[in-house]
Amino acid sequence: MERHDVLVVGAGLAGQRAALAAIQAGRDVAILSKLHPLRSHSGAAQGGINAALGAEDSVDTHIYDTVKGSDYLGDQDAIEFFCKEAGPTVVEMEHFGTIFSRGDDGSLARRAFGGAGFPRTIYAADRTGLALLQALYERIGTESFTLYEEWDLTSIVVREGRCQGVIAFNRLSGSFEPIAAKSVVIATGPAGRVYGRTTNAHTCTGDGIAAAYRAGAALKDMEFVQFHPTALLESSILITEGARGEGGILKNGKGERFMSRYAPHVLDLASRDVVSRAIWTEVEEGRGFPGGYVHLELMHLGQEKIETRLEEICDFSRKFAGVDPVTEPIPVMPAQHYIMGGIGTNLRGETNIKGLFAAGEAACVSIHGANRLGGNSLLETLVFGKQAGIAAAEYAKVAPASTLRESEAEPDAARVKAMSNRAEGEEPQRLRMEMQNVMDTQVGIYRAFSALANALRAIRALQARFEKVRIVDPSSTFNLNLTDALETGHMLDLAETIIVGAIARTESRGAHARTDYPKRDDAHWMRHTLATYSHEGPKLSYAPVAYTRWEPKERVY
Ligand SMILES: Cc1cc2nc3c(=O)[nH]c(=O)nc-3n(C[C@H](O)[C@H](O)[C@H](O)COP(=O)(O)OP(=O)(O)OC[C@H]3O[C@@H](n4cnc5c(N)ncnc54)[C@H](O)[C@@H]3O)c2cc1C
């Protein structure tokens, strides 16, 4: 059996940064990833990464904007640490070789982003994630570590009060293998494919969050799901907030700049929850374009700016919507974009399970609280990826050897074998699509008890049907029908935690907007939701929010 000091699951920005920190601390490190590292969703990030580097900006303003953006649910001690680390983190990535866009004077160019008091989003045109991912991949390539590429994490083994390692599926050989590790860092990224209308890649299925949940980790604030205001109409491909940061404007079917009604001061650059609700309301109240959408206009910015600063956006609009942003408006609607919740951790990436750490979108520290600001997530992967790597390395240095046994891979292998041997049953893809439809239609931007209760019943019915899921493809190499089944099982668990948390939270805060409880209720709900696994469904408990300097106020943009 393979053994390591530190096993990092996920090779996006969070995973690679965690691994680099653990390698630098002198530990034997492995990374396990279902994708080639450069195909991680981090590479799809367009708009940029936040750091208060300009003379007129300050770390304190970044902290304040993040606290306000979170609708006061973010932990202020974590946010303070996070924003202080921003400058050094971006400079380090620049030194690793990230080619950022620059201003005329040669300094790092910055663009305005939603909910930010100053233009503080540093970018590489509209390919910031890819630029960062490539630089970090080249940097980590100079170190020595083991890479399990195209392996899927299926279970995390917790025994004797600590994490002993993982069980993973090797796509090439078709076998389930145990991998022993003293520390395991989960950095498996987003879970956006729980929804159908999402900007997330098809691979963003929340596997690591689900595996941690089944292993006893507490998931934090799962009910908070971010919808990005501007996704292309049919494909849901993201049109970066950078497009509005560069001066793009939203208009409804009557030609009105409707954002003046919802955010009179900052208009199109209000935070994402506010803009998404505004678009939704315009369309619901009949002021959208026929078929239900609004326009994002860039034409007034001029061809040169559009084609240099927003090159990919041009490409996506032309290829996937058949419109040229230089001469025509882009048809957009909100789509699921980010999960604020995840595996609950502290500032060091530690979870409630000894030896189990988490970072990146799979984790919830929490710095985003009820609503994440654009540009803060790339930064989070690097800041807290590094912290989790350091903590995992420290723990591995003193932890006893893992007692994982070869036989512990058998239950996962047996479970999948049963799915393959079934003569009758449903295809995972069908269950996945039904789940996505439930989430799109009943657990969206606006929520209410009756729809949430229907959604919970529907997801539980799908979970029951999943017991009889059938893998029809018999092949033992690169069996995507099999991995589809694994992912669908994970997502059904996560959908359930999102809905149960959303039903319980009888208030509206950040991205969680209840039409039956339209007000924020600080007296009862200024607290984090924790969900732990039980056979009967998620068990909820609550944890306090950390405050340092900012008293909750009404949020106005
Ligand atoms: C289209 C888009 C644009 C965005 N733009 C921005 C932006 O401009 N600025 C910003 O701050 N944020 C942006 N975000 C959010 C941000 O990019 C992500 O939150 C962040 O990059 C996630 O990084 P990560 O390392 O946590 O996960 P990822 O980069 O998604 O990496 C996850 C890794 O986990 C691996 N993995 C997953 N499941 C398994 C499994 N079962 N077994 C083994 N490995 C597994 C994958 O192979 C992958 O390597 C954007 C997101 C999207 C979807």
Image (tube, rainbow, N blue to C red):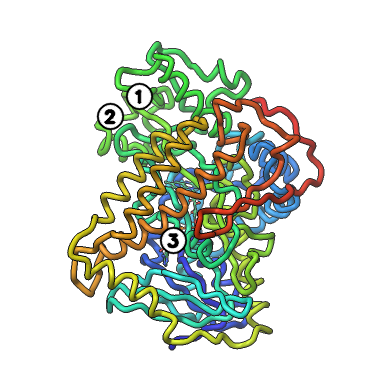
> Real-space Cα distance between discs 3 and 2?
36 Å
Estimate the x, y position of residue 138 in percent, counting from the top left. 46, 69
At label 2, the amino acid type is Val
Q: Position of residue 226 (x, y in %)?
A: 51, 40
- Mark found first going from the N terminus, 1 or 3: 3
Residue at 81% across, 43% down: 549
For numbered disc 2, what is the local secondary structure?
Answer: loop
Q: Is mark 3 within 8 Å of ligand 1?
A: yes
Q: Which mark is residue 207?
A: 3
Q: Which residue is mark 2?
A: 323
Q: Could you give the CA–CA distance between mark 2 and mark 1, rounded to whole angstroms?
A: 7 Å
Residue farthest toward the front in the current orientation of the protein: 536
Give the answer, above or below, for where 96 lies relative to 24.
Answer: above
Query: Which residue lies most toward the right here?
Result: 549
Q: Write down the residue under mark 1.
A: 329
Q: Is residue 249 left or right of residue 21?
A: left
On the image, the x and y values in percent for residue 87 come to: 66, 53
